[in-house]
Amino acid sequence: MQKTIEDIKIELTQPVPSKKNLYKIGRGRFYPDKSVNEFVNASFLEIKHQLGKIETIESPVALDICFMMDDRGDLDNKISMIFDLLQEVKLIGNDRQIRRVNARREKTKKKNSKTFINIVVLENGKG
């Protein structure tokens, strides 16, 4: 049984956009669509409000993600967006630190969409 050293819980009230098709190509570079920036900015404020000071986790982590949403959108694209978000807001140093992911979707009406993220910081590098 693997021991954990920290357990961080986050609740996002913004609907998570699917990563696919939200990045554009211009002048040989990928850049995010406006909706990605809006999601990241709003989520950063929610995370900061819930956690206070954000310290970057450099250890391996495991994620448990529950998407409360309707049936539209690919789960894998939403998971990818969460990885990017955690790295963008500097909650984790790099998404390569993610050793294990448990993700599920619970059906609800679009207006009741939420995402619950539990980040477990692993004591050792094994996941």
Image (tube, rainbow, N blue to C red):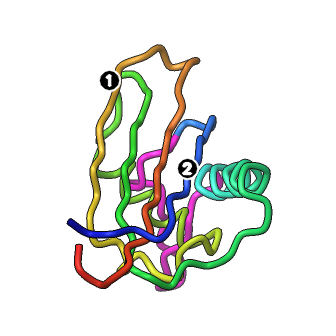
| Residue at image coords 46%, 59% | 119
Vertical relation: 47 (above or below) 62: above
Image side of residue 64 versus residue 40, left or right: left
Q: Earlier in the sequence, mark 2 or mark 1?
A: 2
Vertical relation: 60 (above or below) 14: below
Vertical relation: 86 (above or below) 22: below
The x, y position of residue 69, in whole percent, is 43, 26
The x, y position of residue 65, in whole percent, is 39, 46
| Residue at image coords 55%, 36% | 15
The circle on residue 9 is 2
Do the residues bearing badges 2 and 1 touch, measured as CB atoms within 8 Å?
no
Residue type (three-letter) at the residue carrying disc 1: Asp
Residue 71 or residue 105, whichever sits in front? 105
Vertical relation: 37 (above or below) 29: above
The residue that label 1 is drawn on is: 71
Residue 73 or residue 123, whichever sits in front? 123
The x, y position of residue 24, in whole percent, is 49, 65
The circle on residue 93 is none
Image side of residue 5 versus residue 34, left or right: left
Q: Is residue 78 magenta?
A: no
Q: CA distance from mark 2 to mark 1?
A: 24 Å
Q: Please state, as top left, top right, bottom left or bottom right, where the C terminus lies in the image.
A: bottom left
Image side of residue 56 versus residue 51, left or right: left
Q: Which residues are magenta?
A: 16-34
Residue type (three-letter) at the residue carrying disc 2: Lys
SS assignment at label 1: loop
